[in-house]
Image (cartoon, rainbow, N blue to C red):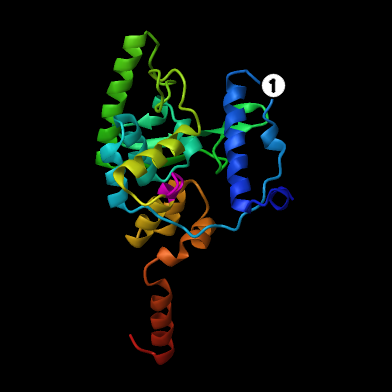
Amino acid sequence: MLEDKLGLSPAVVARCHSQVRAVFSWALRKKLVAANPALSADPPRLKPAKLHIPSMDDVRAVQAVAPAGFAAYVQVAATVGARRGTLVALRWGDLDLEKANATFTRAIAESGDGVVEKGTKADRPYVSSLGPSTVSALQAHRQRAIEQALRIGVPFGAESFVFSDDGGLTHWNLSWPSHAWKRYSAKAGVKPTRLHDLRHTAASQMLMAGVAISIVAERLGCTEGNILRTYRHFIPGSDREAALLMDQMLSGAD
């Protein structure tokens, strides 16, 4: 294996593969190459890492030092728990800020043919409600996008991308939010975590607050089984409550 020949750890090889894949992905988007050969590689499989979950204090700290557009992205990621590709694919027509909800119907992903738009990982559209502060953040973000579109002379409407650097004409580079999270986490003095860990923040906080598993699963666009497998230890008192319940039933206590 490559890691044995080069004397590198599997983690280093996997990280190098990720960086090479990102470079070729960029070159493919710029039409500098015909294909991304890194997608055909077989990097080492790493054991799942222990969850490192940013706290809400961490999230606020990153938002405080990040540009307004990325702060809005983080707001949605931490409160809804949507995946990166799903958020990057979001268009203004998918948001109903009056009713305070977002409909996720598609995702941006890398493939052998370059960056493509496909269905969500849940393989179905799903709707998530938005809290008041998230709605406010998106309203301000929308106004900035409209102003930018006017400045550069591009149309703005329901099909405009929510997270964009050109007034909604095109979406963010898929890898950019991850790089931005790393950069502004460091600037804020927050312990290093992945952007994807904001999904864990959303799920764990909701479960610890007593939100039903079915609702958490729906908001994250996944199954209840996946929630149980990944976040079972965040469901407060479930095992202890089960023990007390069964003990009371057997003893005949009310």
Q: Position of residue 174 (x, y in %)?
A: 50, 32
Q: Is residue 168 left or right of residue 224?
A: left
Looking at the image, residue 145 sits to the left or right of residue 22; the answer is left
* Camera-side residue of 245 and 202: 202
Amino acid under label 1? Ala
In this view, 193 is above or below 36? below
Q: Is residue 100 visible?
A: yes
Q: In this view, which residue lies farthest toward the top?
A: 153
- Using the image, determine if residue 153 lies above or below residue 82: above
The image quarter in which residue 97 lies: top left
User: Could one spot residue 116 in this view of the protein?
Assistant: no
Q: Nearer the viewer, residue 39 or 216?
A: 39
Residue 41 found in image quarter? top right
Residue assigned mark 1: 34
Q: Left or right of 125: which side holds 215?
A: left
Front-most of residues 66 and 144 = 66
Name the residue located 29 percent from the left edge and 42 percent from the top edge.
131
Q: Which residues are magenta?
A: 193-199
Q: Residue at x 43, y 27 (%)?
A: 91
